[in-house]
Image: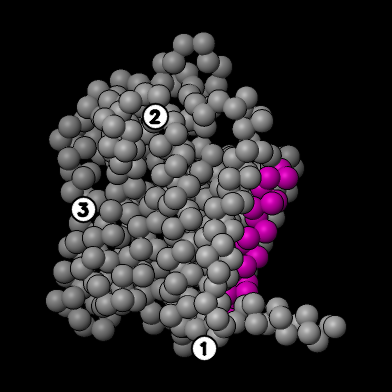
């Protein structure tokens, strides 16, 4: 019985098995879990779809008692892209991540107010599910189990972005699509996808940046120039547009990095949020540090995936204390680290690293517990 069970588990996580049933695949499981989570959260929100926007007094909304959250700004841009600035704390900063609200504007038939809250949620829902599907297909291409894609959808940073209507799911949807296109040797389309991801969330730039860096190290100057032009340049060009429109790019509004590793996290020591931060953020990041050093020791670091992994790791290590104030912001900002780890494990066919990444799936129920 024991050996049969072990064999079945081994087969389940093996890339060498028969074609999956449509309903028994990681992306479908992730989708079902998010639907259940949405129904669970709906009870606490009084089944009000607008509550996921998190409107607040910062946007001059009457009769509110909180500052709200970032989703409100994408809601207002989607309502009226040309005249939403007056409702914002810092308009150029909020307009940096323009692609998400503009897509919602189009899908809500030109900003129909009643549709926007639904479309905000649905765009993120399908972004999470499809990103998981893309990574599952990448894993299968290397004869690895598609179930190792679960961290892409079940990391709690994706979960918080889903219920707070923020841009991370669609940003990393484009990143995952870009890697799938790269694996299929569709380089120009991959560059376009990653460029679009950067216009959803600026931290997505760490992925095309890693790819361009490895092209430069390999002296593939022409490929580096073309890929960088398409994937990296759109973001600074958009910043120049913001400078022209608002007289500012909004870059100085973002919280600055801490000078000491994990300083932003440990300032909360003794606070009630310290324990969940320790479990959800500190322990997994330390494991990342240890494993990224192991990859250097085994000379598996001269890859685009390793460089992107390192850049995302540094982002989390030196994250501002303002980003640790809430589990939401800390999770959102660290999502790229999880995705970068999985991509590197996929590229190097590293089963041990994939198993370690699976620990991130536990953050989904842990986050729900701490709600």
Q: Which residue is drawn at 57% across and 83% down?
A: 17
How far is the residue under mark 3 from the one under mark 1? 36 Å
**Residue depicted at x 17% and y 32%:** 245
Instruction: State the quadrant of the C terminus.
Output: top right
In the rendered image, which residue does mark 1 sit on?
298
Gap in angstroms between the C-alphas marked 2 and 3: 29 Å
Span shown in magenta: 351-370
Residue 21 position within the rendered picture, expressed as x and y whole percent measured from the top left: 55, 69
Number of numbered discs: 3
The residue shown at (54%, 53%) is: 31
Label 3: which secondary element: helix
Of callouts 2 and 3, the N-terminal one: 2
Q: Nearer the viewer, mark 3 or mark 1?
A: 3
Splitting the image into 4 quarters, where does residue 205 fall?
bottom left
Left or right, 115 with respect to 11, comes to: left
**Which residue is painted at 71% across and 43% down in the image?**
370
The spot of residue 314 in percent (x, y) is 47, 62
Mark seen at residue 234: 3
Q: Mark 2 points at which residue?
A: 115
The dominant secondary structure in magenta is: helix
Q: Position of residue 167 (x, y in %)?
A: 41, 44
């Amino acid at each position: 019985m024991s050996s049969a069970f072990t064999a079945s588990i081994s087969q389940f996580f093996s890339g060498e098995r028969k074609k999956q049933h449509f309903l028994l695949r990681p992306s479908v499981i992730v989708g079902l879990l998010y639907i259940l989570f949405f129904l669970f959260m709906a009870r606490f929100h009084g089944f009000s779809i607008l509550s996921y926007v998190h409107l607040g007094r910062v946007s001059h909304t009457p009769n509110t008692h909180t500052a709200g959250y970032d989703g409100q700004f994408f809601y207002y841009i989607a309502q009226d892209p040309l005249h939403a600035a007056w409702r914002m704390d810092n308009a150029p900063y909020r307009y940096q991540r323009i692609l998400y609200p503009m897509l919602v504007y189009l899908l809500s038939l030109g900003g129909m107010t009643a549709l926007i809250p639904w479309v905000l949620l649905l765009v993120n829902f399908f972004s999470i599910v499809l990103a998981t599907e893309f990574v599952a297909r990448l894993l299968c291409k290397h004869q690895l189990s598609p179930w190792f894609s679960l961290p892409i959808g079940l990391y709690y940073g994706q979960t918080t972005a889903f219920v707070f209507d923020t841009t991370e799911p669609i940003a990393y949807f484009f990143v995952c699509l870009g890697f799938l296109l790269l694996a299929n040797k569709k380089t120009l389309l991959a560059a376009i996808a990653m460029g679009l991801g950067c216009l959803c969330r600026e931290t997505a730039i760490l992925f095309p940046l890693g790819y361009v860096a490895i092209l430069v190290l390999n002296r593939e100057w022409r490929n580096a120039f073309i890929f960088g032009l398409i994937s990296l340049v759109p973001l600074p060009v958009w910043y120049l547009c913001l400078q022209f429109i608002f007289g500012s790019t909004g870059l100085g509004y973002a919280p600055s990095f801490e000078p000491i590793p994990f300083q932003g996290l440990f300032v909360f020591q003794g606070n009630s949020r310290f324990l969940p931060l320790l479990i959800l953020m500190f322990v997994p990041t330390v494991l990342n540090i240890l494993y990224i050093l192991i990859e250097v020791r085994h000379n598996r670091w001269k890859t685009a995936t390793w460089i992107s992994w390192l850049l995302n790791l540094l982002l989390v290590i030196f994250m501002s204390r303002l980003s640790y104030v809430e589990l939401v912001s800390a999770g959102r900002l660290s999502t790229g680290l999880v995705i970068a780890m999985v991509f590197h494990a996929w590229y190097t066919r590293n089963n041990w690293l994939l198993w370690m990444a699976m620990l991130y799936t536990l953050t989904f129920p842990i986050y729900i517990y701490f709600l």
